[in-house]
């Protein structure tokens, strides 16, 4: 890496982008596959439909399109991008998909790598990239959240298959020495409770040659204890957000938008209630997309900007949570 140091103190949010596949899987269609109903799914989760990737919609394709969108909004020359971080648990290449996105973008000066933290992935990637910018190493970064969980869902398991969909979002962020719109963050992990939500390695034993075994690569479908994950989310997310607001000296009244990982409408409402944030400030689009894992937060932010909800200088409290178990929160000012 070329040695360069900038005199900078803060992060500025310059653009957003998103992409979802065209294929729509409605609750009605799922109920032809497993024993469920639109009414059950809608009332327990708030989800009506989700998008499903087909050829040409893998994580690299989706991430690229979302990133290009965000870069265009920021009005950047791709050669000025220093860093690309792709949050994903479902890379198109296990060695990493970010380099393919870098190549597709033609962002040849950017270093690009993947980061895995499931549904907390985008938030953790945003925090990671922000620290690089604040540290003075990089000036411009694109943070992408993209996942294709449809490839790893057990489509015969009605307890989990109803929740997930595919999609991607991205934010373009820039270092500045004039102000800091990345106000604060907090991150947590509890591996002890990791078994509540897994996408585990299959452990298929095979033999290379006499007496030398190996484990053939592959993953089992998503395994989830829905009730435990629900309890975890409605307990821990309000705690971490309250802590962050306290540490940054922000009251919840000052929050313009609550942008939570889009897992379940009941989780969103419960967290909002605990923080005394009114429903109209809680952004939600899970009705259309379900849980797109690392994709949800930037997808939601991009949609809210397009719909003229999030505006320049609005305060956004955001939280990602999920497998790991991992969770985190960030307080940002848009612009
Ligand atoms: N359709 C119809 N019935 C279903 C069903 C479905 N899709 N899924 C489960 N059920 C049944 C169960 O079999 C159970 O029946 P029983 O009482 O006869 O055994 C009943 O509904 C209640 O199941 P339960 O698991 O208690 O439902 P729930 O109210 O907890 O809702 C979730 C299930 C998955 C919607 C909910 O637990 C949840 O959203 N958890 C969080 C999951 C999550 O967000 N994961 C990702 C985090 S990043």
Image (cartoon, rainbow, N blue to C red):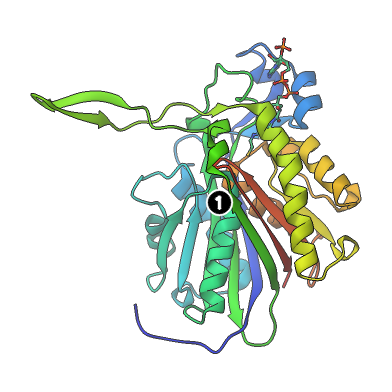
Vertical order, 155 against 141 (above or below): above
Residue 227: image location, x then y, percent: 69, 27
Left or right: 149, with 236 as reference point:
left
Residue at the image point whose x is 80% and y is 65% from the top: 246
Which corner quadrant holds the C terminus? bottom right
Vertical order, 20 against 142 (above or below): above
Q: Mark 1 points at which residue?
A: 121
Q: Residues within 10 Å of mark 1 (few under 14, many from 20)?
A: many
Q: In the picture, residue 202 is in which quadrant?
A: top left
At mark 1, the secondary structure is helix
- Regarding residue 167, the answer to whether it shows in the image is no
Residue at the image point whose x is 79% and y is 57% from the top: 242
Residue 109: image location, x then y, percent: 39, 74
Residue at the extreme front of the image, as rendered: 192
Quadrant of ligand 1 in image: top right
Left or right: 24, with 109 as reference point:
right
Vertical order, 37 against 3 (above or below): above
- Regarding residue 312, the answer to whether it shows in the image is yes
Residue 145: image location, x then y, percent: 56, 52
Query: Considering depth in this image, is 312 or 199 the residue closer to the camera?
Result: 199
Residue at the image point whose x is 67% and y is 30% from the top: 228
């Amino acid at each position: 890496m070329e040695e360069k140091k900038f005199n900078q103190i803060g992060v500025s949010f310059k653009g957003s982008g998103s992409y979802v596949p065209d294929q729509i899987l409605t609750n009605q269609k799922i109920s032809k596959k497993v024993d469920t109903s639109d009414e059950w799914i809608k009332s327990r989760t708030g989800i009506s439909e989700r998008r499903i990737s087909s050829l040409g919609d893998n994580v690299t394709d989706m991430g690229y399109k979302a990133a290009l969108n965000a870069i265009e909004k920021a009005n950047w020359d791709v050669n000025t991008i220093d860093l690309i971080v792709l949050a994903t648990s479902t890379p198109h290449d296990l060695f990493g998909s970010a380099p393919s996105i870098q190549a597709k973008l033609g962002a040849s000066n950017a270093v690009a790598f993947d980061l895995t933290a499931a549904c907390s992935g985008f938030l953790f990637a945003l925090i990671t990239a922000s620290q690089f910018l604040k540290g003075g190493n990089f000036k411009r970064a694109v943070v992408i959240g993209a996942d294709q969980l449809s490839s790893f869902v057990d489509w015969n398991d009605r307890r989990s298959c109803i929740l997930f969909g595919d999609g991607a979002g991205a934010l373009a962020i820039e270092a500045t020495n004039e102000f800091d719109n990345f106000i604060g963050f907090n991150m947590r992990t509890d591996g002890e409770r990791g078994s509540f939500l897994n996408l585990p390695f299959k452990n298929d034993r095979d033999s290379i040659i006499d007496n030398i075994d190996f484990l053939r690569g592959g993953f089992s479908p998503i395994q989830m204890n829905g009730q435990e994950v629900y309890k975890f989310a409605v307990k821990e997310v309000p705690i971490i957000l309250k802590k962050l607001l306290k540490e940054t000296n922000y009251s919840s009244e000052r929050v313009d938008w609550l942008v939570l990982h889009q897992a379940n409408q009941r989780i969103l409402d419960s967290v909002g209630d605990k923080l005394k944030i009114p429903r109209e400030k809680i952004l939600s689009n899970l009705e259309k997309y379900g849980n797109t894992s690392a994709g949800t937060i930037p997808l939601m932010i991009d949609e809210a900007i397009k719909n003229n909800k999030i505006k320049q200088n609005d305060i956004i409290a955001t939280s990602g949570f999920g497998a790991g178990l991992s969770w985190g929160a960030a307080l940002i000012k848009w612009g």
